[in-house]
Structures are given as structure tokens and as C-alpha cells.
Image (cartoon, helix red, strand yellow):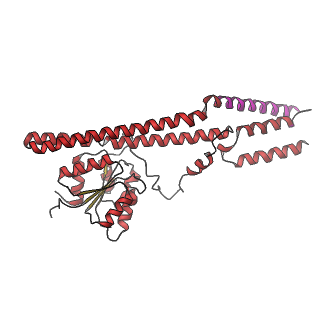
């Protein structure tokens, strides 16, 4: 009898082990543990009692973890908080773009006036306008930085979906997301997609001199 | 040989504001004959329709990126010698190495200033 139960349990455990980690259902793990515990009922040896005790502790850990994760309201994080955060960031990009275009339009009018004035004062105005144009490149950089944050939020969303799948709720698209996130084949160098890193934080970024050194072959 | 200040230049960027900034800076430097495209495929279409003397392109665009545009240009018998400057926030070593391998003429990292743009244009086109 026990041999049959053990064989059935081993088969189920082997099946669970072959699946990607995020798709193993916590309820299923708890059920397997419960089945093992049930198979140990009746006259049991000291060794079996120890196993029973450890399995019982494992079942408690799983129950507690499940309760704690449920308190996080992962479904709400995925369905409400993350999309709202992404919308807010998109709004920041739109607002800064509109503001930058307004600044640019004003600077272009000043530049036209500077040309009409001419002379030293005109040149001074043109230099100031050039500085405004240069400063307006911030909008491109901040826009790309925000896109990076949105991508990170999407990755968190996928992880939350995986967590929900493990809990046996929602996350039906998690397997597809995980497959899409598979890295490229090793040894082939970075793919074009992997080269899209976006702006680096100042502490990590190469400056123009570093880039010129690579281009000129002096790296 | 003097630089033709009326040379047709194609600037490529998915940020309209950046196109406007580069166009204005080029105008200040004396280059007025500027056309625009918002991604690599639109740029390639323009390059095959009209003769340009220089491309200034961003990297991170969809559907065709700047590096893909550069590879298409270098693989095209008619366009392969076209000067191509990458202006991008992609500043990792692997990016610069990939662009160099693809045949970029020069590389400007964003954010940049007018002096850097002028210096890189001079390096590619000659002093002006």
C-alpha cells in the first residue's frame, strides 16, 4: 500500500519538477505534502514520525507564505497600481514634450529677433538661444529614461503574474511572458535588441572623449 | 575643398523635439537644406528617392533602429559611401563598437552641445 502511495507521490513530484518554477501551483505542492502525510497515518516508526513532523512544518510554512502573499494583494498591484504608474509616467513624457516645444517656439522667435537686431547684442541673444536649444535635449533623455522605468514596471508586472500563477489565481499569460523574456543565444554578441540600453546614469555613462577613443581605435 | 553649405542633410529621430533642435542647430551653423524622418525605414525610403550628402541619425527608434538603418545604407551599392553620424543616448562601449563595426562615420552622445555637433560635422565633411 505504502509502496503504491510512494510511487504515485514520486510521479507527481517528478511532474512538478519538470515544469518552470513560476507555473508550479502552491496548492498543488500543499496537496502533495498532505498526501504524503496521510500515507504515514497508522503505526509509524520514529523515522517516519520525524518526516511527518518536518512535512507538517513545511505545510505550515506554505500556508503562512500563501496568506502573506495574499495580504500583498498582488492582483491589485498588477491590475491597478502598475497600470496607473505607467499612465502617470506617460503623462509626464507628454507634459514635458509640450513644455519643451513651447520653449523651443519662444526661442525660435528670439532667434529671429536676434537676427534682425544684429551686432553684439544680436550675437549675445543668438548664443543664449543656442544654450536653450542645447538644454532642451533634456526632453529626449528624460523621455528615454522614463521609457526604461516603464519597461521595468512591465517586468515587475510579469513577475507578479508569475506569483499569481503560483498561487493558483490569474496570471494566465505568465507562461507566454516568460517565454518572451528568454535571453539571446550566448556567444553571438549582443543582439540589436540587447543594444537598446537607453541613457546611462551619469556614474555609468561614457563621455564623448571615451566614445571618440573607441572610434579612433585608441581604446 | 570648401564644404557645400547647401548640401542636403537627412536627420532621423523619433522625437520631434530632437529633430527641431538638430535642425535649428544646423541652421545656426549655416546648413539650411535639411529634411527629416522619424525612423530608419522612413529614412531609407527618402535616401533611395533623393540624393543626400549626410545622414544624422538617432539609434533607438521603431520599427527600424539607427543601427539597422546604418547597415542598410552600407549594404546599398548607391548609398554605401554616404557619411553617417549617429547621435544617441546609447553610450555603452558595446554600442559604440557595434556602430563602428557597421561603418558609422562619427558618433555623438546625447546630451550634446552645438560645439560638439560642429566639431563632428567638420571631422566628417571637412572644416567649414
Question: Residue A57 magenta-drawn?
Answer: yes
Answer whether residue A172 is visible to the viewer in this image.
Answer: yes
Q: Is residue A28 left or right of residue B113?
A: right
Q: Is residue A209 magenta?
A: no
Could you say which is closer to the camera, residue A174 or residue A62? A174
Q: Which quarter of the figure is the N terminus of chain A placed in?
A: top right
Q: Which residues are magenta?
A: A39-68
Q: Residue furthest left?
A: A119
- Percent position (x, y) of residue B64? 41, 57
Residue that protrudes farthest toward the bottom in the picture: B77
- Describe residue A182's horizontal placement relative to residue A7 as left or right: left
Which residue is painted at 26% across and 39% down in the image?
A103
Q: Quadrant of residue A114?
A: top left
Q: Main secondary structure of the magenta part?
A: helix
- Estimate the x, y position of residue A50 in percent, counting from the top left: 82, 31
Q: Position of residue B51 (x, y in %)?
A: 27, 66
Q: In the rendered image, is residue A209 in sight?
A: no
Residue drawn at (31%, 44%) of the image:
B111
Q: Which residue corresponds to the image point at 71% horizontal and 49% vertical from the top-left?
A: A18
Residue in the picture at 47% in, 52% down: A194
Tally of numbered discs: 0
Instruction: Give the x, y percent position of residue A86.
Output: 47, 38
The quadrant in which residue A172 appears is top right
Amino acid at each position: 500500500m505504502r509502496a503504491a502511495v510512494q510511487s504515485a507521490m514520486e510521479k507527481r513530484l517528478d511532474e512538478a519538477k519538470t515544469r518552470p518554477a513560476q507555473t508550479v501551483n502552491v496548492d498543488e505542492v500543499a496537496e502533495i505534502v498532505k498526501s504524503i502525510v496521510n500515507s504515514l497515518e497508522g503505526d509509524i516508526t520514529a523515522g517516519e514520525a520525524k518526516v511527518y513532523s518536518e512535512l507538517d512544518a513545511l505545510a505550515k510554512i506554505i500556508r503562512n507564505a500563501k496568506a502573506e502573499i495574499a495580504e500583498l494583494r498582488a492582483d491589485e498591484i498588477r491590475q491597478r497600481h502598475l497600470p496607473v504608474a505607467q499612465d502617470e509616467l506617460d503623462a509626464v513624457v507628454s507634459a514635458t514634450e509640450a513644455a519643451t516645444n513651447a520653449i523651443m517656439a519662444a526661442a525660435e522667435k528670439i532667434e529671429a529677433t536676434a537676427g534682425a537686431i544684429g551686432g553684439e547684442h544680436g550675437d549675445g541673444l543668438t548664443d543664449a538661444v543656442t544654450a536653450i536649444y542645447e538644454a532642451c535635449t533634456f526632453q529626449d533623455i528624460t523621455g528615454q529614461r522614463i521609457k526604461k522605468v516603464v519597461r521595468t514596471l512591465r517586468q515587475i508586472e510579469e513577475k507578479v503574474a508569475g506569483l499569481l500563477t503560483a498561487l493558483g489565481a490569474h496570471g494566465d499569460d505568465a507562461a507566454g511572458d516568460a517565454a518572451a523574456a528568454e535571453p539571446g543565444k550566448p556567444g553571438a554578441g549582443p543582439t540589436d535588441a540587447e543594444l537598446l540600453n537607453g541613457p546611462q546614469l551619469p556614474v555609468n555613462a561614457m563621455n564623448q572623449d571615451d566614445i571618440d577613443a573607441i572610434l579612433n581605435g585608441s581604446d | 575643398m570648401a564644404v557645400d553649405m547647401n548640401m542636403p542633410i537627412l536627420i532621423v529621430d523619433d522625437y520631434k523635439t530632437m529633430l527641431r533642435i538638430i535642425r535649428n542647430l544646423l541652421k545656426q551653423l549655416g546648413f539650411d537644406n535639411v529634411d527629416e524622418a522619424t525612423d530608419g525605414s522612413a529614412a531609407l525610403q527618402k535616401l533611395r528617392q533623393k540624393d543626400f550628402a549626410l545622414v544624422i541619425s538617432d539609434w533607438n527608434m521603431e520599427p527600424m533602429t539607427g543601427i539597422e538603418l546604418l547597415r542598410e545604407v552600407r549594404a546599398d551599392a548607391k548609398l554605401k559611401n554616404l557619411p553617417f553620424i549617429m547621435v544617441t543616448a546609447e553610450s555603452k562601449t558595446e554600442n559604440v563598437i557595434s556602430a563602428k563595426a557597421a561603418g558609422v562615420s562619427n558618433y555623438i552622445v546625447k546630451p550634446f552641445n552645438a560645439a560638439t555637433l560642429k566639431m563632428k560635422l567638420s571631422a566628417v565633411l571637412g572644416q567649414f
